[in-house]
Amino acid sequence: MSTRKPYVTYTLLGIQIVLFMLMTFMGGSESSTTLLLFGAKFNPLIAAGQYWRLITPIFLHIGVVHLLINSVTLYYLGSMTENILGHWRYLVIYLSAGLMGNLFSYQFSQNISAGASTALFGLFAVFLALRNLFPRNYYIQNIGSQYLMLVVMNLVFGFLGSGIDIWGHIGGLVGGFLMTMALVQGDGQDKRWMQRIGSAVSYIVIAIFILVNHGTFNTLFGG
């Protein structure tokens, strides 16, 4: 842990709050038309070439309760994670988890979706990865166990409930875990280069597979 200010977390919070206000002004955050205008995940438009919709949903929210829950979670969980990882690793993992979450949602769900929860589940996965990387750190082991229970409970409720993009959450977990394993060295003198490279390659392979499976990869590269 460090005492550095979580400037990245503050910036992410500011972006999603400003966008929510703009959406409210331009038709409401629960309007499908407004959501699509601001970049919500919508499979036909992604397949048509709007690949930025795999990133922009991270910053959009559907209703004030959705925004409030994710903002509070981002403030506390994001600040803690940023203090542990540092600014740039934290930002890369946050965005990578959100991207993978939206890729999973693109693969398995046809619904319009938005929300920071894809990236937030990636932050939970950070601590699951850190448990493997720092087996002798009591703080990491303790908080990792707590977050593991929280993740399992959320996934169970997600599968049982409705209106929750469970595949986005699962994808966020996968993305956050793999990118943490790729970017963090862990205990010991061994820098784990092969394992770190393998984690990064696994992330890329999964992303490419989803794009190929949806027939968008060739379009993306002009094939």
Image (cartoon, rainbow, N blue to C red):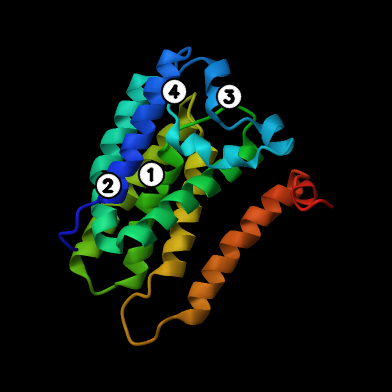
Instruction: Give, as a three-letter code, the residue at label 2.
Output: Leu
**Up-down: is 196 above or below 111?**
below
Instruction: Write down the residue under mark 2.
Output: 77
Kindly tell me whether residue 119 is visible in this rendering: yes
Q: Position of residue 206 (x, y in %)?
A: 63, 56
Mark 4 vs 3, N-terminal side: 3
Q: Earlier in the sequence, mark 1 or mark 2?
A: 2
Rendered residue at 38%/33% (across/down) = 16
Image quarter (top left, top right, bottom left or bottom right) of the N terminus:
bottom left
Q: Position of residue 128 (x, y in %)?
A: 36, 59
Q: Which residue is mark 3?
A: 36
- Which of the two discs, 3 and 2, labels the residue nearer the N terminus? 3
Q: Is residue 54 above or below residue 217?
A: above
Mark closest to the chain's N terminus, 1 or 4: 4
**What residue lies at 24% left-to-right and 49% top-to-bottom?**
79
Percent across and percent down for residue 43 are 67, 33
For label 4, the crowd category at 10 Å Cα-Cα, with few meaning under 14, some 14 to 19 and many 20 or more, is: many
